[in-house]
Image (tube, rainbow, N blue to C red):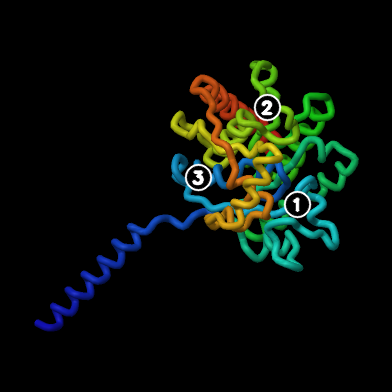
Amino acid sequence: MMRYISIGILSLVTLLATSCMAAEEPRPIRMLWLGSSSLYFHNQPKVTTEWLTKFGNMPAKAEVAGRSGTGVHVYLRENFKAEYGLKPGQTVLQKIAEDKYNYVVLQVPAEFINGPEGDEHDKSLDIYCKAIREAGGQTVFYEMGWGRDEKADIGRQKIFAAAARNRVTMVAPCSTAWQRVRKEKPQFELHNLPDTAHPGTLGCYLNLCCFYAAFTGKEPPPNVPATISIWHLTADEKTAAAAKAKTAHFDEYDAALAGWMKTLVVAGKTASVSDDTATYLRKVAWKEYQSMQKRLKDAIR
Protein backbone atom coordinates (compact mmCIF):
# COMPACT_ATOMS: atom_id res chain seq x y z
CA MET A 1 0.00 0.00 0.00
CA MET A 2 2.79 2.41 0.96
CA ARG A 3 4.44 1.61 -2.36
CA TYR A 4 1.40 2.82 -4.31
CA ILE A 5 1.12 5.94 -2.14
CA SER A 6 4.80 6.74 -2.77
CA ILE A 7 4.33 6.29 -6.52
CA GLY A 8 1.26 8.54 -6.40
CA ILE A 9 3.09 11.26 -4.50
CA LEU A 10 6.03 11.06 -6.89
CA SER A 11 3.70 11.35 -9.88
CA LEU A 12 1.98 14.36 -8.32
CA VAL A 13 5.30 16.09 -7.62
CA THR A 14 6.43 15.41 -11.19
CA LEU A 15 3.16 16.79 -12.56
CA LEU A 16 3.40 19.92 -10.43
CA ALA A 17 7.04 20.48 -11.45
CA THR A 18 6.13 20.03 -15.12
CA SER A 19 3.23 22.47 -14.76
CA CYS A 20 5.47 25.05 -13.11
CA MET A 21 8.04 24.74 -15.89
CA ALA A 22 5.32 25.15 -18.51
CA ALA A 23 4.04 28.24 -16.71
CA GLU A 24 7.48 29.88 -16.66
CA GLU A 25 7.92 32.82 -18.99
CA PRO A 26 10.14 32.14 -22.02
CA ARG A 27 13.72 33.30 -21.64
CA PRO A 28 14.17 36.69 -23.37
CA ILE A 29 16.16 36.78 -26.56
CA ARG A 30 19.36 38.79 -26.10
CA MET A 31 20.45 41.50 -28.49
CA LEU A 32 23.64 43.49 -28.81
CA TRP A 33 23.31 46.76 -30.73
CA LEU A 34 26.59 48.09 -32.11
CA GLY A 35 26.76 51.68 -33.26
CA SER A 36 26.75 55.36 -32.48
CA SER A 37 24.20 58.05 -31.66
CA SER A 38 21.59 57.35 -34.35
CA LEU A 39 21.50 53.81 -32.99
CA TYR A 40 20.95 54.60 -29.31
CA PHE A 41 19.12 57.92 -29.67
CA HIS A 42 15.62 58.02 -28.13
CA ASN A 43 16.48 54.64 -26.54
CA GLN A 44 15.71 52.98 -29.86
CA PRO A 45 17.10 49.54 -28.85
CA LYS A 46 15.14 49.49 -25.60
CA VAL A 47 11.87 50.60 -27.19
CA THR A 48 12.31 47.98 -29.91
CA THR A 49 12.54 45.25 -27.26
CA GLU A 50 9.45 46.66 -25.54
CA TRP A 51 7.50 46.46 -28.78
CA LEU A 52 8.75 42.93 -29.49
CA THR A 53 7.92 41.77 -25.97
CA LYS A 54 4.45 43.28 -25.78
CA PHE A 55 3.23 43.02 -29.36
CA GLY A 56 5.47 40.51 -31.16
CA ASN A 57 5.45 37.58 -28.72
CA MET A 58 9.25 37.91 -28.59
CA PRO A 59 10.44 38.73 -25.05
CA ALA A 60 13.73 40.53 -25.58
CA LYS A 61 16.55 42.37 -23.80
CA ALA A 62 19.01 44.75 -25.42
CA GLU A 63 22.52 46.04 -24.78
CA VAL A 64 24.43 48.71 -26.67
CA ALA A 65 28.14 49.07 -27.31
CA GLY A 66 30.26 51.45 -29.29
CA ARG A 67 31.31 55.07 -29.53
CA SER A 68 29.47 58.16 -30.69
CA GLY A 69 30.31 59.62 -34.09
CA THR A 70 32.09 56.52 -35.40
CA GLY A 71 31.30 53.57 -37.61
CA VAL A 72 31.47 49.94 -36.51
CA HIS A 73 34.65 49.49 -38.56
CA VAL A 74 36.51 51.70 -36.08
CA TYR A 75 35.59 49.29 -33.27
CA LEU A 76 37.84 46.65 -34.85
CA ARG A 77 40.93 48.83 -34.84
CA GLU A 78 43.75 48.10 -32.45
CA ASN A 79 43.52 50.02 -29.18
CA PHE A 80 39.90 51.09 -29.84
CA LYS A 81 38.30 52.44 -26.67
CA ALA A 82 34.53 52.24 -26.40
CA GLU A 83 32.44 54.89 -24.68
CA TYR A 84 29.81 52.36 -23.64
CA GLY A 85 29.15 48.64 -23.54
CA LEU A 86 32.63 47.06 -23.29
CA LYS A 87 34.54 46.02 -20.21
CA PRO A 88 38.04 47.49 -19.71
CA GLY A 89 40.40 45.72 -22.09
CA GLN A 90 37.60 43.85 -23.85
CA THR A 91 37.30 44.00 -27.64
CA VAL A 92 34.00 44.02 -29.46
CA LEU A 93 34.76 40.65 -31.05
CA GLN A 94 35.51 39.19 -27.62
CA LYS A 95 32.16 40.46 -26.35
CA ILE A 96 30.35 38.81 -29.27
CA ALA A 97 32.19 35.53 -28.73
CA GLU A 98 31.87 35.46 -24.94
CA ASP A 99 28.32 36.69 -24.44
CA LYS A 100 26.76 34.75 -27.33
CA TYR A 101 23.83 36.96 -28.28
CA ASN A 102 20.85 35.72 -30.23
CA TYR A 103 21.08 38.81 -32.43
CA VAL A 104 23.71 41.43 -33.08
CA VAL A 105 22.49 44.63 -34.74
CA LEU A 106 25.10 46.41 -36.87
CA GLN A 107 24.53 50.07 -37.65
CA VAL A 108 25.53 50.48 -41.30
CA PRO A 109 25.24 54.11 -42.46
CA ALA A 110 25.14 54.77 -46.18
CA GLU A 111 27.46 57.74 -45.58
CA PHE A 112 30.13 55.52 -43.99
CA ILE A 113 30.08 52.59 -46.40
CA ASN A 114 30.33 55.04 -49.31
CA GLY A 115 32.62 57.52 -47.58
CA PRO A 116 36.39 58.02 -47.27
CA GLU A 117 36.67 54.89 -45.09
CA GLY A 118 34.11 52.96 -47.13
CA ASP A 119 36.31 49.99 -48.00
CA GLU A 120 37.30 49.48 -44.36
CA HIS A 121 33.68 49.77 -43.26
CA ASP A 122 32.52 47.32 -45.92
CA LYS A 123 35.18 44.74 -45.08
CA SER A 124 34.46 45.06 -41.37
CA LEU A 125 30.92 43.78 -41.99
CA ASP A 126 32.33 40.48 -43.27
CA ILE A 127 34.40 40.14 -40.09
CA TYR A 128 31.41 40.86 -37.88
CA CYS A 129 29.08 38.49 -39.72
CA LYS A 130 31.59 35.66 -39.45
CA ALA A 131 32.14 36.29 -35.72
CA ILE A 132 28.40 36.46 -35.03
CA ARG A 133 27.76 33.19 -36.90
CA GLU A 134 30.58 31.44 -35.03
CA ALA A 135 29.06 32.61 -31.73
CA GLY A 136 25.72 31.09 -32.71
CA GLY A 137 23.89 34.37 -33.35
CA GLN A 138 22.25 36.14 -36.25
CA THR A 139 23.30 39.43 -37.80
CA VAL A 140 20.80 42.24 -38.24
CA PHE A 141 21.68 45.18 -40.47
CA TYR A 142 20.42 48.62 -39.44
CA GLU A 143 20.33 50.24 -42.88
CA MET A 144 20.89 53.86 -41.92
CA GLY A 145 21.49 57.07 -43.82
CA TRP A 146 19.50 60.28 -43.86
CA GLY A 147 21.14 61.83 -46.94
CA ARG A 148 19.13 62.74 -50.02
CA ASP A 149 21.83 62.70 -52.71
CA GLU A 150 23.33 60.16 -55.09
CA LYS A 151 26.03 59.26 -52.57
CA ALA A 152 23.35 58.01 -50.20
CA ASP A 153 21.79 55.94 -53.01
CA ILE A 154 25.15 54.32 -53.74
CA GLY A 155 25.63 53.70 -50.02
CA ARG A 156 22.30 51.85 -49.79
CA GLN A 157 23.32 49.72 -52.77
CA LYS A 158 26.56 48.80 -51.01
CA ILE A 159 24.70 47.93 -47.80
CA PHE A 160 22.43 45.62 -49.80
CA ALA A 161 25.44 44.01 -51.49
CA ALA A 162 27.10 43.41 -48.11
CA ALA A 163 23.91 41.81 -46.76
CA ALA A 164 23.58 39.53 -49.79
CA ARG A 165 27.27 38.62 -49.70
CA ASN A 166 27.04 37.63 -46.05
CA ARG A 167 23.62 36.00 -46.41
CA VAL A 168 22.07 38.45 -43.95
CA THR A 169 18.31 38.24 -44.35
CA MET A 170 17.39 40.40 -41.37
CA VAL A 171 17.64 44.00 -42.52
CA ALA A 172 15.79 46.96 -41.03
CA PRO A 173 15.37 49.12 -44.18
CA CYS A 174 15.28 52.44 -42.35
CA SER A 175 17.17 54.55 -44.89
CA THR A 176 15.15 53.14 -47.80
CA ALA A 177 11.91 53.80 -45.91
CA TRP A 178 13.00 57.40 -45.23
CA GLN A 179 13.54 57.95 -48.95
CA ARG A 180 10.08 56.61 -49.76
CA VAL A 181 8.44 58.92 -47.22
CA ARG A 182 10.36 61.90 -48.57
CA LYS A 183 9.15 61.13 -52.06
CA GLU A 184 5.52 60.43 -51.19
CA LYS A 185 5.08 62.87 -48.29
CA PRO A 186 7.63 65.68 -48.69
CA GLN A 187 5.76 67.70 -46.05
CA PHE A 188 6.73 65.14 -43.39
CA GLU A 189 9.86 66.17 -41.47
CA LEU A 190 11.64 63.05 -40.27
CA HIS A 191 14.17 65.08 -38.27
CA ASN A 192 13.37 67.41 -35.38
CA LEU A 193 14.97 70.50 -36.90
CA PRO A 194 17.52 71.97 -36.54
CA ASP A 195 19.00 68.54 -35.68
CA THR A 196 19.53 66.76 -38.98
CA ALA A 197 22.01 64.20 -37.59
CA HIS A 198 19.53 62.12 -35.60
CA PRO A 199 16.05 60.76 -36.29
CA GLY A 200 13.26 63.02 -35.08
CA THR A 201 9.83 62.02 -33.81
CA LEU A 202 8.55 60.72 -37.15
CA GLY A 203 11.94 59.31 -38.14
CA CYS A 204 12.24 57.42 -34.86
CA TYR A 205 8.74 55.97 -35.19
CA LEU A 206 9.47 54.88 -38.77
CA ASN A 207 12.72 53.23 -37.65
CA LEU A 208 10.96 51.35 -34.85
CA CYS A 209 8.43 50.02 -37.34
CA CYS A 210 11.26 48.84 -39.61
CA PHE A 211 12.94 47.02 -36.72
CA TYR A 212 9.68 45.40 -35.65
CA ALA A 213 9.21 44.06 -39.20
CA ALA A 214 12.83 42.87 -39.42
CA PHE A 215 12.70 40.92 -36.14
CA THR A 216 9.19 39.46 -36.43
CA GLY A 217 8.67 39.20 -40.18
CA LYS A 218 5.27 40.79 -39.55
CA GLU A 219 3.62 44.14 -40.16
CA PRO A 220 3.69 46.41 -37.09
CA PRO A 221 0.21 46.20 -35.55
CA PRO A 222 -2.03 49.27 -35.12
CA ASN A 223 -1.69 49.17 -31.35
CA VAL A 224 2.08 49.76 -31.17
CA PRO A 225 2.52 53.03 -29.22
CA ALA A 226 2.41 56.21 -31.29
CA THR A 227 3.77 58.11 -28.27
CA ILE A 228 7.51 57.92 -27.71
CA SER A 229 10.20 59.67 -25.63
CA ILE A 230 12.29 62.08 -27.68
CA TRP A 231 15.74 63.27 -26.64
CA HIS A 232 15.93 66.69 -28.31
CA LEU A 233 16.77 69.09 -25.47
CA THR A 234 17.87 72.67 -24.98
CA ALA A 235 21.14 73.47 -23.19
CA ASP A 236 19.25 74.50 -20.05
CA GLU A 237 17.21 71.29 -20.07
CA LYS A 238 20.38 69.22 -20.34
CA THR A 239 21.96 71.04 -17.38
CA ALA A 240 18.90 70.48 -15.20
CA ALA A 241 18.64 66.85 -16.27
CA ALA A 242 22.32 66.16 -15.51
CA ALA A 243 21.75 67.07 -11.87
CA LYS A 244 18.59 64.99 -11.71
CA ALA A 245 20.28 61.98 -13.28
CA LYS A 246 22.75 61.73 -10.37
CA THR A 247 20.02 60.53 -8.02
CA ALA A 248 17.59 58.94 -10.49
CA HIS A 249 16.76 55.22 -10.41
CA PHE A 250 17.45 53.41 -13.68
CA ASP A 251 16.41 49.98 -14.91
CA GLU A 252 18.97 47.43 -16.11
CA TYR A 253 19.16 48.78 -19.66
CA ASP A 254 19.40 52.47 -18.75
CA ALA A 255 21.84 51.81 -15.89
CA ALA A 256 24.39 50.46 -18.39
CA LEU A 257 24.31 53.62 -20.53
CA ALA A 258 26.97 56.31 -20.51
CA GLY A 259 26.41 59.33 -18.27
CA TRP A 260 25.23 61.72 -20.97
CA MET A 261 22.75 59.12 -22.22
CA LYS A 262 21.26 58.87 -18.73
CA THR A 263 20.81 62.62 -18.77
CA LEU A 264 18.81 62.33 -21.98
CA VAL A 265 16.77 59.44 -20.57
CA VAL A 266 15.80 61.51 -17.52
CA ALA A 267 14.83 64.56 -19.59
CA GLY A 268 13.22 62.84 -22.56
CA LYS A 269 10.10 64.60 -23.81
CA THR A 270 6.95 62.74 -24.77
CA ALA A 271 5.96 63.21 -28.41
CA SER A 272 3.00 61.74 -30.25
CA VAL A 273 2.42 60.74 -33.85
CA SER A 274 -1.09 61.26 -35.21
CA ASP A 275 -3.12 58.16 -36.03
CA ASP A 276 -3.15 58.82 -39.79
CA THR A 277 0.58 59.49 -39.90
CA ALA A 278 1.39 56.46 -37.74
CA THR A 279 -0.72 54.22 -40.00
CA TYR A 280 1.08 55.53 -43.07
CA LEU A 281 4.56 55.07 -41.54
CA ARG A 282 3.76 51.50 -40.45
CA LYS A 283 2.65 50.68 -44.00
CA VAL A 284 5.82 52.18 -45.49
CA ALA A 285 8.04 50.18 -43.12
CA TRP A 286 6.20 46.97 -43.95
CA LYS A 287 6.26 47.50 -47.71
CA GLU A 288 9.95 48.31 -47.74
CA TYR A 289 10.70 45.33 -45.52
CA GLN A 290 8.81 43.03 -47.90
CA SER A 291 10.59 44.52 -50.89
CA MET A 292 13.98 44.12 -49.22
CA GLN A 293 13.20 40.50 -48.35
CA LYS A 294 12.32 39.65 -51.94
CA ARG A 295 15.45 41.33 -53.28
CA LEU A 296 17.67 39.60 -50.73
CA LYS A 297 16.19 36.16 -51.38
CA ASP A 298 16.67 36.60 -55.11
CA ALA A 299 20.26 37.81 -54.65
CA ILE A 300 21.22 35.10 -52.17
CA ARG A 301 19.65 32.36 -54.27
Residue type at tag 2: Trp
Residue type indicated by callout 1: Arg
- Tag of residue 29: none
Residue tagged 1: 67
Marks 1 and 2 close (CB-CB < 8 Å): no
Circle 1 SS class: loop
* In the displayed structure image, the side of residue 212 where residue 190 appears, left or right: right
Q: Is residue 216 left or right of residue 142?
A: left
Residue 83 image position (x, y, % from top left) = 74, 56
Q: CA distance from mark 3 to mark 1?
A: 24 Å
Q: Are marks 3 and 2 in contact (CB under 8 Å)?
A: no
Whether residue 231 is visible to the viewer of this picture, yes or no, is yes
Q: Which residue is mark 3?
A: 50
Q: Residue at 62% x, 34% y: name it.
A: 204
Q: Residue at x 47, y 46 (%)?
A: 53
Closer to the chain start, of discs 1 and 2, is 1
Instruction: Find the distance from the CA under tag 3 to the CA under tag 2.
Output: 23 Å
Does residue 297 appear in this view? no
